[in-house]
Image (cartoon, grey):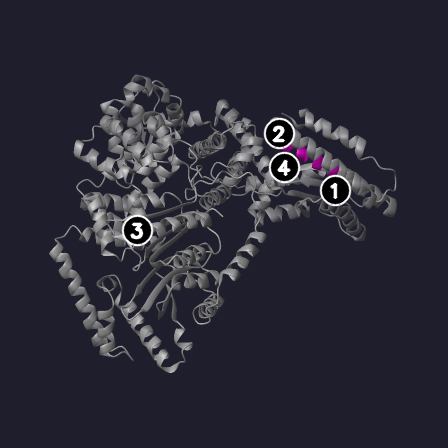
Amino acid sequence: MPIQDNPLYRRLHQHAQKRLVFDPGVSRSKQLPAYKRYVELEKVMLERQHRKGTSGLEVCQARAAMTDVVIENLFLAALDLYTTQYGTLPCKMAILATGGYGRRELNPHSDIDIMFLYPVKAEGKAFAKFQEVVTEEILYPLWDLGWKVGHASRNAKEVIEECRKEVQSKNAILESRVICGSEPLYKSMRSRFDDFCKKENSKIYIQQRLEDELARHAKSGDTIYLQEPDVKNGVGGLRDYQNILWMAYIKYGFRSFRDLVKAQLLRDDERQAMVDAYDFLLRTRTELHLQNRRPTDILDLEQQPVIAQFLNYRQKDIFARVESFMKDYYTAARTIYRTSEMLKERMAIEAKSGRSGRITFREALRAHQHLPVKRVEGFQLYNKVLSSDNQKVFNEDPVRLIRIFRLAQQFGAKIDSNLRYLISRSILLIDHSIINSPSAAKSFCAILRSPGEVYPTLLEMHELGVLGRYLPEFGALTCMVQHEYYHRYTADAHVLRTIRHLDRVFSKHDEEYGRYEKELRKNDDPLLLYLILLLHDIGKVEGVKDHDVAGVRIAQPILNRFGVGTEQQEQILFIIRNHLEMARFWQRFDLDDPQTAESFAKFVEDPQILRFLYVHTYCDARGTAPTLWNSYKDAMHRTLHLRTLEQFEDNAIIEQKRKDLIRMLHQQLVERKVQGISEEEIEAHFSLLPERYFINTEQSEIELHLRMVNGLLTQIQAADSMGSLAPIIDWHDDIDLSMTVVNVVTWDRAGLFYKLAGALTLAGVNIVSTKAISRKDHISIDTFYIMDPDGGVVSSLKAREVFEQRLTEALVEEKELMQEITELESKLLAASKKKKDMLPAPFPPSVDVYHELSLKQTIIEVQASDRIGLLYQISRLISKKGFDISFARIATERGVAMDTFYIKNEHSKEATHTTALLELREELDKIVRE
């Protein structure tokens, strides 16, 4: 619709004629209140229209028109001021809108980019004064209105020079228009610009645009289906729509999608779908700006409910409302992405013809049909492209809708854009008979048995709607937002990304992937894991809770349809039911305790199941969020795997290996003759510590502990009674784990753990994991694995100084750290902004206290919103209740603390112990709910 036909445009101009009328000679400062009033009233009107459901583009155009009105009036006032004070104007000029403003696409807090355009030969004092007056009389009021205005002053020659240097300048001029001033001056510049674009190498520009797009997509997660997508720069975002038009202009001179339709590069229904999708994203971005009161493009999870509500999604259930809104968002983004990708392909095909004149896509296709082609299963294969000249190819045999993807995978071929269009229009042919067809199942399972090549094929099937139609149980996951704090992708995207990582395992992208491939290849049928990953989250269609149980029930009929044998079904269903268990084990339990591996081995029962779980857990985590997996988690995962594998050996062999290891360590330490450490001290260390310490501790770490114990004993002999309480501290970085390791050796005493945790809290570091062990002579060795709040090793020297100072105060001076921690928490809370309209917490805060019989341990598990001092409060309460912490695993993911503690109380009787545990649980529950 032409802008003049937009009713909002006419209304804005009518209001301006009433409100922006001034007596001659009224100063800029006295006019400003009227401009502010006009802008505020029009903004209210535009917001009202937006909330009524007016087209996103119409509202954006109206906002641009309002901006035009203000600039036009300021421009006329500036000209009047100049002629009154200095006489005749020295030259013509024009004010241009560029970039998004040039497109007339302004969201509430979009930048406003303008250019003051002057003739090439304009110069002299009068011209300089003219520039000064116009610039000041226009820019100062715009800034006073609170607008973010980007500006430049150029002549046509300078415009071309700038475009030659900077591609962003070229894009800005592509979409420029005159706001006010001399139209002929602008047309002259535009003519020079168009000539410049024709002479420039279009291939270089297009390559730059494609590289920019790849970089944007990578930065924004490289998928449409993010939990918190970027509306502007993400995959299928506003910029993708704009980018394809820029390339079409540079290559062909086309200015709109209607031009592409005329050239038969685009069908009209595709054009309309593209325009509708773009309009939806503009509406969404407008609401984003209104809610945040600033420019932003990220659809924050916590804001999605209120954004959905103001976009007229009225479901009472907040999750249903968000689900409906986000499905529409993903559909719009998918339309933009698919159509732009298709256009890039069609334009590339056209470029191969070598003709000087333009030819249509259909002409190019007809030309190809005269070349020799290979006939495959009803399709044509030419130059690694699959096509068909038969519009009824799928009606004749609907199984071809599955088989075509197997052929593309098998031949390493692309499916051409016309055939993809036909596929998307034929998916309703996939009915109950095709879903249950043995022939279709055979083709689909063949796709899953091509190691390293499965993800691209399944992704294309999914994008064209075939995967969800053929596997309706998976189709129900499409665009499903996962309201879990650690998930970054929708349920369907997550599953496909896990498969992408399995492809990389089989392709051995690097040493890490290679380790998993080596283990998986030991199984009888390693490719079975593709099917397991495809089905592992299928139960989420019934909700996140117990989705593993539901998954087994839903997956079994699918496995029957695919003709999977009984033994393999048992393996698959066991892993679907328990696909979270391996990570839960190493996240919760002490891997240095031999009982942990023994218990897990009894759980899995079979080394093949263990290896499937090992690789599955890795792919599942890598496909959940880019930052979820790290070297520390990989090390814990690998440790549990290797120690569990050992459990499948003969018990006598396991025991002998342990004894041999301890004997070897003892001998090596004696032979090394560690400086300052006598053989008697080494002997004492080995006799005063349990066997498991030596089994799970590296020789270098044992040597470090020996030196620290020696330092503590030496200090006791030299110091007074107070000085003997001071701890010995070692602080070093572990590059392999990307963490800092803090070892503390001191006398064991009540509350030692919480005092250590409190000192680290005040040092401003994140505690990831801890382990503690005491010698029989009451010397405690505590190890903390810590990270900087932004991740990685702790590089701050101040953090170390604060820790050592606060720990000395707590242990030597017996200073209570609670008050300082509370004050620090209050400061941070005061500095943070409260967020409104948040989704309900995706997890309930919880405390579990139980006896794990298989591990012979009493365990506390805590899940709560993380906050400063939480660990200190929890561990302090445990100590005050008379329990010692022998092991702690501290984990924080996206603001959620998930902590596990092993506790013991050697002195209480069973009945008293049970009562104390119940009291402890109740008081811990109060802490996590604060």
Q: Given contact means CB atoms under 8 Å apart, are the residues at marks 4 and 1 in contact?
A: no
Q: Earlier in the sequence, mark 3 or mark 2?
A: 2
Residue 51: give its label: 2
Is residue 66 in the magenta section? yes
* Residue 89 rendering spot, x and y as whole percentages: 82, 44
**Other-residue count near label 2 (Cα within 10 Å), few / some / many at <14 / 14–19 / ≥20:** some
Tag 1's secondary structure? loop
* Residue at which label 3 appears: 911
* Residue 653 rendering spot, x and y as whole percentages: 12, 57
Q: Given contact means CB atoms under 8 Å apart, are the residues at marks 4 and 3 in contact?
A: no
Q: CA distance from mark 4 to mark 1?
A: 24 Å
Q: Is residue 604 visible?
A: yes
- What's the amino acid at mark 3? Ala
Q: CA distance from mark 4 to mark 2?
A: 16 Å
Bounds of the magenta segment:
54-72
Q: Is residue 856 above or below residue 746?
A: above
Q: Main secondary structure of the magenta part?
A: helix
* Residue at which label 4 appears: 106
Residue 93: give its label: 1
Tag 2's secondary structure? helix
Can you tell which of label 4 and label 3 is closer to the viewer? 3
Q: Is residue 279 above or below residue 870?
A: above
